[in-house]
Image (spheres, rainbow, N blue to C red):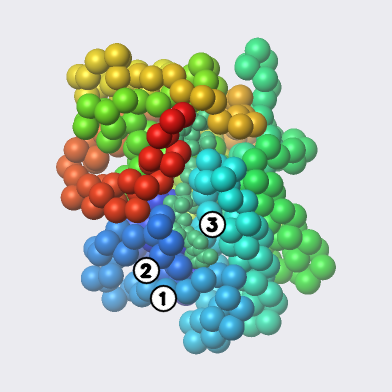
Amino acid sequence: MTIIVTGGAGFIGANFVYHQLKHHDDKIVCVDKLTYAGNLETLDAALKSAQFSFIRADIADRDAVYKIFADVKPDVVVNFAAESHVDRSIEDPELFLRTNIIGTSVLLDACRKFGIKRFHQVSTDEVYGDLPLDRPDLFFTETTNLHTSSPYSASKAAADLLVQAYQRTYQIPATISRCSNNYGPFHFPEKLIPLMIINALNDKPLPVYGTGDNVRDWLYVEDHCAAIDLIIRRGTVGEVYNIGGHNERTNLDVVKTIVHILGKSEELIQFVTDRKGHDRRYAIDPTKISTELGWTPQTSFDDGIRLTVDWYLSNRAWWEKIISGEYQTYYARMYGDR
Ligand code: NAD
Ligand code: TYD
C-alpha cells in the first residue's frame, strides 16, 4: 500500500519513516512544509530508498494537498504535521490554529474527496490538560475529558474533535493516538531533553522552569512509532488509543540524569521564570492499547536516555547546524532575560 506521512521531516515523523522502511515494504510519501522544525537532512538515508519519496507542501494549502492526493492515491495517511512547541504557541497562537486545525481539516477533506482506507491523527496527552502533583493514583484514560491549557494543546484538541466529527458525519475511517512526551534521535533542540544535552555539552546554563517539580511521562520515540504502526494496521476505526509507558519523572530529575551521564556539574542548573499556564503532571494509562493490540514499550527510561545522549554525541553535525542558525535568535528571545 501507499502511506502518506505528513510532518515526516520532523522528530517523530522521521523516526516513523525509518520504522516503516525497516519493517514493511509499503511505499512511503513524506509531505512536509519544512518549517524551522523540519529538516531534509534527517531524511538523507530514507531518500536513498526506492520505497520513499518527499514532497514539500503545506497541509493547510488545499490545492497542493488535493493535487498530492490525486497523484499519490494514498491508502493511508498518518498526520504528524504540526506546530509542536508549547512555548512558541504561547508567543504566537495563530500559526498553531492554521497548521494544527485548518491543516487537519484540509487533509480530512482530501480523504472525503479521494477516498482513504485509514486516516490516522497523531495527537498528544496534552489534550487532557494536567493532573495534580499530589494524586499519583490518577492517570489519563481515553475517556478523560479534554481540558486544555496552552494554545498548542487547544489546537490539537480541536483537531481531534474534527477527526471524530468527520468520522461520524462522513464515515472517514479514522483513528487517533494520544501519546506522552517522546525523546530520542532527531529531537529538535528547543525541547527539554535535547536542549539540556546540548547546553550541558557546551557548558551553558540549564534553564529549568519554575521549581522543576513538573512531571512528564517519557516514551522512547521508537516505542511510539511501533504503537502507531500497530494502530494503522490492526486498530479499530473510530477508536482513540493512549500511548505511554509509565516513565514519569520530574523535570529536575531528567536534567540531573543528563548532567550525570555527561559527567558535568549540577551547578549548570539555573531555575528560571516558569512557563505561563504550565501543566503540572502528565501520566498515561496505556491499558487499552496493551490489552487490545498487545503493545508494550520496549525501552526503559534509563536505557532510552543513554541511547539518546549517545546519539547526540555521535551526531554533532546534525544539531550544530541547527543551533547555529535561526535558533540563536529564538534562544535569545525565549531565555535572554528569563
Ligand atoms: P516537530 O515539530 O519535530 O515536527 C513537525 C514537522 O511538521 C516538521 O517537519 C515541520 O516542518 C512539519 N510541519 C509543520 N507545519 C506544517 C505544515 N503546515 N504543513 C506540512 N508540514 C508541516 O514535531 P514532533 O515532535 O515530531 O511531533 C509530531 C506530532 O506528534 C505532532 O502532531 C505533535 O503534536 C505530536 N506529538 C508530539 C509529542 C512529542 O513529545 N514531541 C508527543 C505527543 C504527540
Ligand atoms: P517540552 O520539552 O517543551 O515539552 P512539553 O511542554 O510538551 O511537555 O517541556 C517538557 C517540560 O520541561 C515542561 O514541563 C517544560 C520544561 N522545560 C524546562 O524546564 N526548561 C526548558 O528549557 C524547556 C524547553 C522545557
Residue matched to label 1: 55
**Ligand 1 contact, mark 3 (Cβ < 8 Å):** yes
Q: Is residue 37 left or right of residue 131?
A: left
Q: Assess disc 2: are there few (<14), some (14-19) or many (≥20) residues with their C-alpha within 10 Å of its C-alpha.
A: few
> What amino acid is at disc 3?
Ala
Earlier in the chain: of badge 3 and badge 2, it is 2
User: Picture coordinates of residue 106 (x, y %)?
Assistant: 65, 72
- Asked where in the image residue 223 lies, by quadrant, the reply is top left
Camera-side mark, 3 or 2 = 3
Contact between labelled residues 2 and 3, with CB atoms less than 8 Å apart: no
Question: In this view of the protein, which residue sits in the foreground, 205 or 103?
Answer: 205
* Alpha carbons under labels 3 and 2: distance apart: 26 Å
Please say whether residue 218 is visible from this viewpoint: no
Q: Give the label on residue 25, or none.
A: 2
Residue 32 circle label: none
Q: Secondary structure at mark 3?
A: loop
Query: Residue at label 3?
Result: 82
Q: Is residue 81 above or below residue 310?
A: below
- Give coordinates of residue 132: x percent, y percent: 67, 20
Please give the name of the residue rendered at 43% of the width and 61% of the height, measured from the top-left corner.
35
Disc 2 to disc 1: CB gap under 8 Å = no
N-terminal of the pair, mark 2 or mark 1, is 2
Residue type at mark 2 is Asp
Left or right: 184 in relation to 290: left
Q: Going 53% across and 76% down the picture, which residue do you hit?
A: 74
SS of the residue under disc 2: loop
**SS for dot 1:** strand
Q: Residue at x 46, y 23 (%)?
A: 272
> Local crowd at mark 3 within 10 Å, few (<14), some, or many (≥20)?
many
CA separation in Å, label 2 and label 1: 19 Å
